[in-house]
């Protein structure tokens, strides 16, 4: 497999993810998920939106390095990637975002009704792809755990949508609630490695699933803090500051609230009510919140790295440590 390539930095790893997705996982999806007018909004995101394809690639990389046949984990890779694309279609609709990166959002291109109906229609193929695990040499106990974890994805993703929608412009929240939201929003990636390790643990008679899940949760928090910061800095023009405009929970706001007195919190509430985004950004800058968030991001990623240090062989450990670096903030891309 392509993971025999030498991986020395995060860009090498991103390139490997893309290669595995294009050569192995996307063809697998296309053989099981028809291209037609009903699936067009989801395929539109799958084909055109540039994302890190770790959900597709890491299951195959982990399996190869642990001596597990890729046939056992490629349904996990395919369903994880497809479910994430479905969630992006839905997320843009709920956020009222007109763009996804540098392309139109699916509900803008195809209409909200078609995009949302297509999402539910496409999800039926996720279930069909996942059911292929039952034809492999995997115990019913492990298959049941995988099925339940994928069902939980839908629960957690829609819980995150509801949390954001029902708490719009409500600043009565804390960092613990933001971290909970981050775990919900990143459940696809967390579940990808969790499900992969369930299968690998059974094959190798090991017990690493819960450790890898903890690693993923820590990296997920770091990655979401990174995204929240980039939303306010590096990508503020292309992403349109939608979290601030919509009044959604995010890490910089949670951090800001921690450092505000009651009068300042009341002032922030008024700014949200009046949608004075630039004034909110000025408050964040005055309290040096971005700098504090950068420290938290790096700390969470470092905690994840400690789990990996003694868990796997040198090659797989190196890949997962490099992956953790990709979830850290690059300071010179912020200021």
Image (cartoon, grey):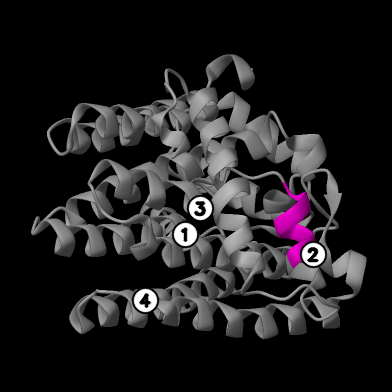
Location of mark 2 (residue): 96
Label count reads 4
Q: Callout 4: few (<14), some (14-19), or many (20+) C-alpha neighbours within 10 Å?
A: many
Dot placed on the residue nearer the N-terminal end, 4 or 3: 3
CA gap, disc 4 and disc 3:
16 Å
Residue 103: x, y in percent?
Answer: 85, 49
Residue 163 shows in this picture = yes
Residue shown at 47% from the left, 41% from the top: 223
Position of residue 102 relative to residue 310, above or below, is below
Location of mark 4 (residue): 133
Q: Callout 3: few (<14), some (14-19), or many (20+) C-alpha neighbours within 10 Å?
A: many
Q: Which quadrant: the C terminus? A: top right
Kindly check if marks 1 and 3 are in contact, taking CB atoms under 8 A apart as contact.
yes
CA gap, disc 2 and disc 1:
29 Å
Location of mark 3 (residue): 56
Residue 209: x, y in percent?
Answer: 20, 57
Find out whether residue 48 is within the magenta segment: yes
Mark 2 vs mark 1, foreground winner is 1
Q: Quadrant of residue 76?
A: bottom left
CA gap, disc 3 and disc 2:
27 Å
Kindly check if marks 1 and 4 are in contact, taking CB atoms under 8 A apart as contact.
no
Q: Which residues are magenta?
A: 43-49
């Amino acid at each position: 497999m392509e993971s025999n390539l030498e991986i020395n930095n995060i860009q090498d790893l991103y390139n490997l993810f893309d290669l595995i997705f294009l050569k192995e996982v996307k063809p697998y999806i296309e053989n099981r998920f028809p291209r037609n007018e009903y699936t067009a909004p989801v395929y539109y995101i799958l084909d055109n939106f540039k994302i890190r394809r770790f959900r597709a690639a890491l299951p195959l990389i982990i399996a190869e390095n642990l001596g597990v046949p890729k046939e056992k984990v490629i349904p996990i890779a395919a369903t994880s990637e497809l479910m994430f694309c479905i969630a992006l279609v839905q997320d843009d609709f709920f956020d009222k975002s007109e763009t996804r990166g540098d392309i139109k959002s699916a509900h803008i291109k195809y209409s909200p009704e078609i995009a949302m109906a297509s999402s539910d229609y496409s999800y039926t193929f996720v279930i069909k792809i996942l059911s292929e695990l039952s034809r492999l040499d995997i115990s019913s106990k492990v298959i049941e755990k995988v099925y339940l974890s994928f069902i939980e994805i839908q629960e957690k993703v829609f819980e995150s949508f509801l949390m954001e929608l029902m708490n719009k412009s409500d600043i009565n929240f804390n960092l613990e609630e933001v971290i909970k939201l981050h775990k919900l929003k990143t459940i696809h990636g967390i579940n990808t490695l969790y499900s992969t390790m369930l299968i690998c643990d059974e094959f190798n008679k090991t017990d690493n699933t819960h450790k890898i899940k903890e690693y993923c949760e820590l990296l997920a928090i770091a990655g979401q803090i990174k995204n929240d910061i980039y939303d306010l800095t590096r990508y503020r023009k292309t992403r349109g500051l939608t979290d601030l405009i919509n009044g959604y929970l995010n890490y910089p706001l949670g951090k800001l609230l921690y450092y505000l007195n009651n009068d300042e919190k009341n002032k922030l509430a008024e700014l949200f009510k009046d949608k004075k985004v630039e004034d909110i950004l000025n408050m964040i800058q005055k309290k040096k919140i971005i700098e504090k968030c950068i420290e938290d991001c790096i700390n969470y990623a470092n905690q994840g790295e400690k789990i990996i240090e003694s868990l796997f062989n040198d090659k797989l450990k190196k890949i997962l440590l490099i992956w953790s670096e990709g979830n850290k903030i690059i300071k010179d891309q912020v200021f």
